[in-house]
Image: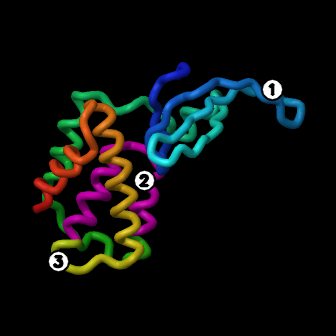
Amino acid sequence: MFKIGDMAVYPTQGVGVIEDIEVREYSGQTLKYYILRLVDSDMRIMVPVGNATSVGMRQLIDQQRITGIFDALAERTENGKIASWSRRQREYNDKLKTGNLLEVAEVLRDLYQIKTSKELSYGEKKVLEQARKLLVTEVALAQGAKEDQVMQRLENIFH
């Protein structure tokens, strides 16, 4: 699925580069692993090749889908659909865990819209930052743009 040098997205962690594909033995089993170095943090993650799809590891978003992401960000939605923060947080975290950039964009949009009517709690701010980081990093890398440019485009949508 991936080869050395490819970029891949690991849900909740972001974009990384496949640095190596190693064969390791654990408990008598020999498995192949992708060695993924995250772009933002230099953290290395070992992902069993056979589990890459089930954990949500995927290719960078393609150019055609980026427009849809920004369209979703610009949609106005009803903020109060889930009353309590704990239930919203659970839903937001579930969406972030999918690794689907459209769902990450929905989390970002919802929190930006809530932010216009009230100050976000510490937990809400943390989720907003995580969603923004995931989206901005991937879109910038997919477009060959600077993160500042993508961030400015986001700010233009929400202000």
Q: Amino acid at mark 3?
A: Ser
Q: Amino acid at mark 1?
A: Thr
Provide the residue designation for mark 3: 117
- The residue tagged with tag 3: helix, strand or loop? helix
Q: Is residue 4 left or right of residue 81?
A: right
Residue at position x 25%, y 80% in the image: 119
Q: Which mark is residue 110?
A: none
* 38 up-or-down from 31: above or below: below
Q: Which mark is residue 96?
A: 2
- The residue tagged with tag 2: helix, strand or loop? helix
Give the mark nearer the N terminus: 2 vs 3. 2
Span highlighted in magenta in the image: 89-114
Residue at position x 35%, y 79% in the image: 121
Residue 140 at x, y = what percent?
A: 29, 38
Task: Say if mark 3 contacts mark 1, CB within 8 Å.
Answer: no
Residue 59 at x, y = what percent?
A: 42, 29
Magenta-drawn stretch, dominant element (helix, strand or loop): helix
Give the mark nearer the N terminus: 3 vs 1. 1
Task: Say if mark 2 contacts mark 3, CB within 8 Å.
Answer: no
Judged from this view, the residue extending furthest toward the right is 28
Q: Is residue 101 magenta?
A: yes
Residue at position x 32%, y 72% in the image: 82
The Cα–Cα distance between marks 2 and 3, rounded to whole angstroms, is: 23 Å
Residue 103 at x, y = what percent?
A: 34, 49
- The residue tagged with tag 1: helix, strand or loop? strand
The Cα–Cα distance between marks 3 and 1, rounded to whole angstroms, is: 54 Å
Provide the residue designation for mark 1: 30
Residue at position x 36%, y 71% in the image: 124
Q: Nearer the viewer, residue 2 or 145?
A: 145
